[in-house]
Amino acid sequence: MSVARMISLTVNGETLEATVEPRKLLADVLREDFGLTGTHVGCEHGVCGACTVLIDDQPARACLTYAIQMEGHEITTIEAVGGTDLSPLQRALHEEHGLQCGFCTPGIIMTFEAFLRDTPDPSEDDVRDVLSGNLCRCTGYQNIVAAVLKAARTIREERP
Amino acid sequence: MSEMEGFHYIGKPLARKEDKRLVTGRGRFVDDIVVPGALHACFVRSPHAHARILKISTEAACDLSGVIGVFTGEDLDRWTNRLRVAPPIEGLHPTEISTLPIDKVRFHGDPVAVVVAKDRYVAEDATELVDVEYELLPAIASLENALVGNAVLVDETLPSNLVSHQSFSAGNVDRRRKEAHTVVEASFYQHRQTHVPMETRGCVAVWDAGREHLTFHTGSQVVHPLRSQLAVRLGLSESQVAVISLDVGGGFGQKIALYREELTVAALARHLSRPVRWREDRSENLMAASHARENFCRTRASVTAEGRILGLELEITEDFGAYCFYPANYMSRVVAMILTGPYRIEDYAFDVKIALTNKCGNGPMRAPMSITSWVMDGTIDAVARQLGLDPVDVRRTNMIGTEDLPYRMPTGELLEDITPAETLRSVIDAVGYDAFRNRQRALRNEGRYIGLGLCTVVESTTYGSAFYKSTGIPGSGHEAAWVRIEPSGVVNASVGLGATGQGYETAMSQAVAEGLGVDPSCIRIHIGNTDVAPYGMGSRGARGGTAGGGSLYLCAQKARGHVLRIAAHELGLNSASDLRLLAGRVERLLNGVWSATGISLADIARTAYLDPTNLPDGVAPGLDFSLTYDPPPMTYSNSSHACEVEVDIRTGMLSISRYVVSEDCGTVINPIVVRGQQQGAIAMGLSGAMLEEVVYDENGQNLSATFADYLVATACELPNFEILHNHTPNKRTPAGIKGMAEGGVMGSIASLTNAVNDALAPFGVVANRQPLSPQYLRSLLRERM
């Protein structure tokens, strides 16, 4: 344990401050200090992917990251995805029944928002390979894969 | 009540109402619920499998800044009542446990003390400062060691570790054995697994000292039975406890019992008069929440030369772990009860032994009877192998046909409205059985080994109250619902289920919509709060559809009858017999055509609430309806599974190339939700049969307490599932619903293993243990290549 200190993080485009111990995980600071409870904690050892957020636009595990390390970086959480409408991926997950209990879903969305930005036309194998970093206990993954592929098509079609 | 056609809202593939909050991160799981000033609990857990507790020193932990206190089994024994499991079941020994251990720990991970602190990090720090002095006892880490004559006792109040033993016989299996052409023996070992909900256990307990009332936020499948348990164990009345479960991140059977940790947290909140919360971490969940399975089955089938089964004998031994949160025969008795499943077998005997060991206690996990279909269809495959017959022919020789229904199983269970021969035929046609055999032969010549495994499942669902009565298991299988049409005409409804991802807010609104005659978009389902929902039995045993959906459907029909009576009065009619409600509007049958009356549900609601003097004579104001429904003792769904695999004989690597299932689960309320349940159940079965395994070493040390050790299938190990529909209604249930969501586990573990054995047939080896790891398959092949 060590002394808490003030940190300032950029989360979803806003500057937020908290007084935390250096050992406090990013996931816990997001949830407890900033009230952003959409980032879920499923294993605290980096396997399940439920806590995935974007750090400087790249997916990362918020349970393996200390908040204090994130000063000077941009954090994006599920709360910033979609606006009044859902994003194409969120919509596709709804339409394809790509979620049941929904606990793993925010982590999957963060993983694939970044993936589809960089890989607009993935194969099913590409999607399954990336999805293997997120555990889902309810769906058997089939509908999540279908949803990601559908979202990719939608994004390609909507692109100017 | 056997209609399948003619539904307006049941059977529609409506996308789920609950999705929007979940895809935007606005769900409310246990840890998302903010309670200002809540203290954090963290448990001190035993590093030993079996040891006496000599002394617990808490001073150093209490001195840590931020720690409120450290509490032990003796404290909890003053504040709570013990759990006694003593149902009237012959051959079952009663057990009693304290809320936290006092004299000894019984498994690696057993909670021995609890720290309460202002912060979760500090609470966890403090657990390391609690010094527990132990005297080690020999650990019982296997079934074999549990049942030897002089074994150390896991529970010292019992005469032996054999906590439960039942046997049964119908017909005369001894005589059938003597008459048989051949007696085929087979064995099946299913390993220890655990549920792994993505949201671990957790709770927030808020004690209102002024009102003497506990509000308990947790993730539960059964909020009312949990409330009853909490009240009894805390010495409170049921009016002093409310249980609230908003969003629950998966349950799979793990979130039914009141476990010791949750009870401890509730007792602490009351003792301290401060809110206390607890979030289980993943290693605790894997080690100490609840385990499942680990049973060993042996069958002996007396058969004719043509493969007709004359008699069947079953022995089951289950490793139940250290503590009984359920009657110890709870899971295995269902395996024994429904083993014969889709086959005509009259002479049948079983022997079921349950042993306590120094492992985490067992509980029901999605398909508690999951081994059943593997044992039965694995036995059929063993018969085919030994007699040199085609496994499909042996299935057909023994299968129950439509002409045999209703069919009384040798254990007395009644099968009706099932279609196993039809689902088997449909799945065999879909996979192209003969073409597969040709392909298999050709590939074998190239040194490649593919296999096809089949399994037909008869899935026990719903479990009415008569089942509980006949088995001696405490509880009931009925369900309760209410439907309220509000003054504006919108509909609120509730039922005593506990959602953990089944889409009840959508499917249950369809059941209400159908019964009432209102679009599902106008209906809101309120569940998971004991102060709001009626006392129901929660979600377990594939009962949501038939018991939950059925009671809402019937309650909504009751509401419709009342609404139409008022409508008839407004229209000046003597009877409502020619009226119906559809899409919230009253229609009248005139000359064989349904015609608008201009009266809407909102009009009726306004009269009922705001202008009740205009109601017919004898009709009370308001539109508030409730009902309870007790389903049949058991309903049955059926399905046939076909799994195609390839085994790399050099590495033992197993891959699934195709998976087809044909299912009859009766009337489907929402096909999207049902398909999701089928996929999820098959996935859970395959993951368990290929990868997952709780491993204890010979000293009872748990070696699988992280996701790096306890492997859950990812998107790369699972195939797409092809699902064929052969649904036929149940004639006895509301709307013809049968229930489903566990059979996928039963069929997948069986068809996968049967497929592996088909692939490896040229080597003369039989895989009779799970998981089907590369190491295990190589160990079978090593001496045969």
Image (tube, helix red, strand yellow):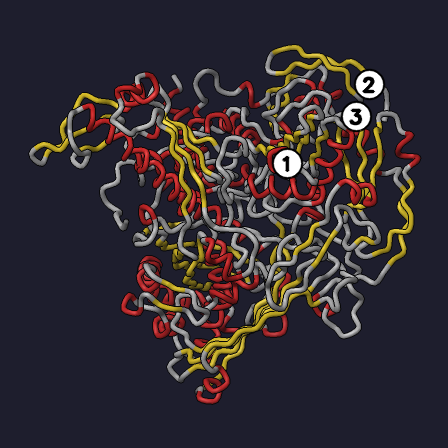
- For residue B437, which numbered disc appears in the image? none
- Give the residue type at disc 1: Gly
In the rendering, at what x and y percent does residue B378 appear? 49, 69
Residue name at image x 64 percent, y 44 percent: B258
Residue at which label 1 appears = A42
All told, the count of numbered labels is: 3
Question: Is residue B225 among the parts visible in the rendering?
Answer: yes
Q: Nearer the viewer, mark 3 or mark 2?
A: 3
Q: Is residue B202 left or right of residue B391?
A: right
Q: Say if B276 sits above or below B431 in the image.
A: above
Give the residue displayed 76% in from the left and 75% down from the top: B149
* Alpha-carbon span between mark 3 and mark 2: 15 Å
Q: Earlier in the sequence, mark 2 or mark 1?
A: 2
Are both tags, 3 and 2, on one chain? no
Residue B699 image-quadrant placement: bottom right
The residue under the point 80% across, 32% down is B116
Residue B582, given in percent of the width and then of the height, sits at 24, 30
Chain under disc 2:
A
Q: Which residue is mark 2?
A: A4
Find residue B118 and name its label.
3
Say which amino acid is labelled 3.
Lys
Q: Tag 3, which chain? A: B
B46 or B276: nearer the viewer: B276
Q: CA distance from mark 2 to mark 1?
A: 25 Å
Q: Are marks 2 and 1 on the same chain?
A: yes
**SS at badge 3:** loop
Callout in the foreground (1, 3): 3
